[in-house]
Image (spheres, coloured by chain):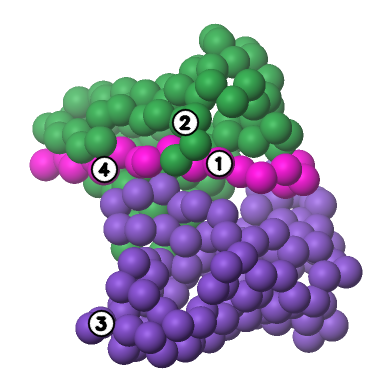
Amino acid sequence: DGGITQSPKYLFRKEGQNVTLSCEQNLNHDAMYWYRQDPGQGLRLIYYSQIVNDFQKGDIAEGYSVSREKKESFPLTVTSAQKNPTAFYLCASSMDRAGTYEQYFGPGTRLTVT
Amino acid sequence: KNQVEQSPQSLIILEGKNCTLQCNYTVSPFSNLRWYKQDTGRGPVSLTIMTFSENTKSNGRYTATLDADTKQSSLHITASQLSDSASYICVVITFSGNTPLVFGKGTRLSVIA
């Protein structure tokens, strides 16, 4: 899991509520990412950020929002607009976004919405 | 379309046996290929990173091969242990696009006593 922490490990919410997942890294990495993992599927990119105060949509950004106010932190908010939010969410970081350098993953947060 | 296909989807082997996992890709242009191990409920951990010019790379009991001509890679696990039970994910990195990392769906390996 390297120097990336995600909290909480398990999260339960009622449908219609927004929820924020935490991701912190102490690796001094510029790039940070959020992925969603569903059973039987590969990781899918939600959002990524290359530098502070900048972020870009990934393949499945609808219903999610992020912020990058500090280099170390990249929280993900799952909004009520996300139609199927129950999933395993993984945060990752790397020295750059181009894929040149190793990407380190956090331990993940399992979100259950009922 | 950039894709990474892994086979088999799942595999059960006896402790001590060897196994080989396959990864075929159509990603272009190719930068490098990575194998990750993901324990249940945990984040993926890197096993190997292979560039275009590398054919084989080992990490302990794990040996990855790459054939850039046929766009195939394999991960061979020798003398399997119960702790090898996990999902193994093949990731191909491309130079282009907004999402340079293309993930396979993984192979679920179960090692039983």
What is the secondary structure assignment of the residue under circle 2? Answer: strand
**In the image, which disc is placed on residue A4?**
2
- The residue that mark 1 highlights is A104
What is the secondary structure assignment of the residue under circle 4? Answer: strand
Query: Spatial distance from mark 1 to mark 2, Cα to Cα?
Result: 8 Å
- Above or below — where is B17 with respect to B76? below
Highlighted magenta segment, given as a residue range: A98-114
- Give the chain of mark 3: B
Q: Is residue B101 visible?
A: yes
Q: Classify residue B29 by image quadrant.
A: bottom right
- Residue B5 is left or right of residue A39, and the answer is right
- Give the chain of mark 2: A
- Residue type, mark 1 in image: Tyr
Task: Return the x and y of residue A7 as percentages of the image width and height.
Answer: 30, 28
Task: Return the x and y of residue A8 as percentages of the image width and height.
Answer: 26, 29
- Residue type, mark 2 in image: Ile
Within 10 Å of the Cα at label 4, are there few (<14), some (14-19), or many (20+) other Cα atoms? many
**Mark toward the viewer: 2 or 3:** 3
- Quarter of the image with the C terminus of chain B is bottom left
Between A83 and B5, which is closer to the camera in this rendering?
Answer: B5
- The residue that mark 4 highlights is A110
Task: Return the x and y of residue B17 as percentages of the image width and height.
Answer: 41, 89
Query: Spatial distance from mark 4 to mark 3, Cα to Cα?
Result: 27 Å
- Residue type, mark 3 in image: Ile
Q: Colour of chain B?
A: purple
- The residue that mark 3 highlights is B112
| Pointers 1 and 2 in contact (C-beta within 8 Å) | yes
Q: Are marks 3 and 1 on the same chain?
A: no
Q: Are marks 2 and 3 on the same chain?
A: no
